[in-house]
Image: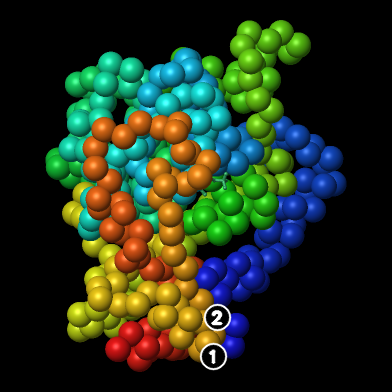
Amino acid sequence: MKNLQLVDLSTQYQKIENEINEAVINVIKSTAFINGPEVKNFQNDFENYLNVKHVIPCANGTDALQIALMALGLEPGDEVITPSFTYIATAEVIGLLRLTPVFVDVDEDTFCIDPNSVREAISNKTKAIIPVHLYGHCAPMKEMLEISEEFGIPLIEDTAQGIGSDYIFPDGSSKKAGTMGAIGCTSFFPSKNLGCYGDGGAIMTNDDNLAKIIRMVSNHGQSKRYYHDVIGVNSRLDSIQAAILRVKLPHLDSYLKARQDAAAYYNSAFEKCDKIITPVVRDFTTHGFHQYTMKLVNTDREALMAKLDAEGIPSNIYYPLPIHLQKAFVGSFKLRVSLNVTEQLMKSVLSLPIHTEMDDEQLSFISNGVLNNIL
Ligand SMILES: *Cc1c(COP(=O)(O)O)cnc(C)c1O
């Protein structure tokens, strides 16, 4: 099997090559590189897809999170609750703004924030909670929204890995990940479920007033041209990236389906292997499978990875070190709950290649490789 990759962006591009090239060239010809019409067009398309009132495009997912925290007007020392088992960006922006991260544990089956852990970690300084839709599985939003309401603390959803996933409420109604909390944040990093060809991000909200503040913060704190009401940042989605995203958005649902099909293949291949616990999908969510992350039982993970690598099968650990154990965070966070599950998961998770262009031949090669080497 040649050239297996964790993510294959090239084959995906080839299928939409003409449309993409035309969209990019049109922006170049128009020279409307910054805040051109394509940015507004993508914003409208994305608002419709997500069924959310406001999308504010920005430069990347990390900026989206930072701008969300700035828009809530938090002060240094205010506490923000977030899982430690996530990508660094979620907590990095909390530290950057001199807010205090308070780390909580995750559910051992879904890898997502544990609402009981959140309840234990709340203090009178808690000013925001950031649930993460990790790997494409929605966080338990019903419970999180109840906590938000009960304590009057806004939720910022980090849906950088969960864009397009649906959260299903007990009455059967559903909402898109990133549209349930006060603010949602996403990334269009190329390998994300909806990726552009460079950096990109967006902030979502149904709140008119927050939308106004978010727009202002992301545009130099400017209320009208050359009048700056607050300290802001410069964070924009390029017109070229917006044009690419407009071409790709109509494919998002089929991209998610392709990922789900690949995950289903792995699940059935590993069904009988007692050393692998395949990903759990709760009834309240669809799973976008940004990652196919399994848990290994009584297995030397590093040895397995080395054997897979020797056979040309890439694998990766998301994430090998939780944030509360990262050097950059020493002494700058609070812990009120045990992070036992997080510390266990860190040792047992392994992610296999998953993307929109996997065929049965590749899936069979990879799953056989895993099964043959895990023994
Ligand atoms: C990718 C990612 C981000 C950051 O997005 P960038 O566009 O790379 O800045 C934030 N949170 C999570 C969970 C991510 O996976």
Between the residue at mark 2 and the residue at mark 1, the CA separation in whole angstroms equals 7 Å
In the image, is residue 268 above or below residue 349?
below
Numbered marks: total: 2
Q: Residue at x 72, y 53 (%)?
A: 23
In the picture, measured across the screen, residue 104 lies left or right of residue 211, that is left
Q: Which residue is mark 1?
A: 1
Q: Nearer the viewer, residue 272 or 343?
A: 343
Pointer 2 local density, CA inside 10 Å: few below 14, some 14–19, many at least 20 = some
Front in this rendered view, residue 179 or 308: 308
What amino acid is at disc 2? Leu
* Relative image position of residue 180 (x, y in whole percent): 33, 34
Rendering coords of residue 247 (x, y %): 61, 54
Percent of width and height locating residue 213: 53, 17
Q: Residue at x 30, y 39 (%)?
A: 104
Q: Is residue 50 left or right of residue 282?
A: right
Task: Please tell me which residue lies in front, 279 or 29.
Answer: 279
Image quarter hosting the N terminus: bottom right
Do tag 2 and tag 1 residues touch (Cβ < 8 Å)? Answer: yes
* The quadrant where residue 287 appears: bottom left
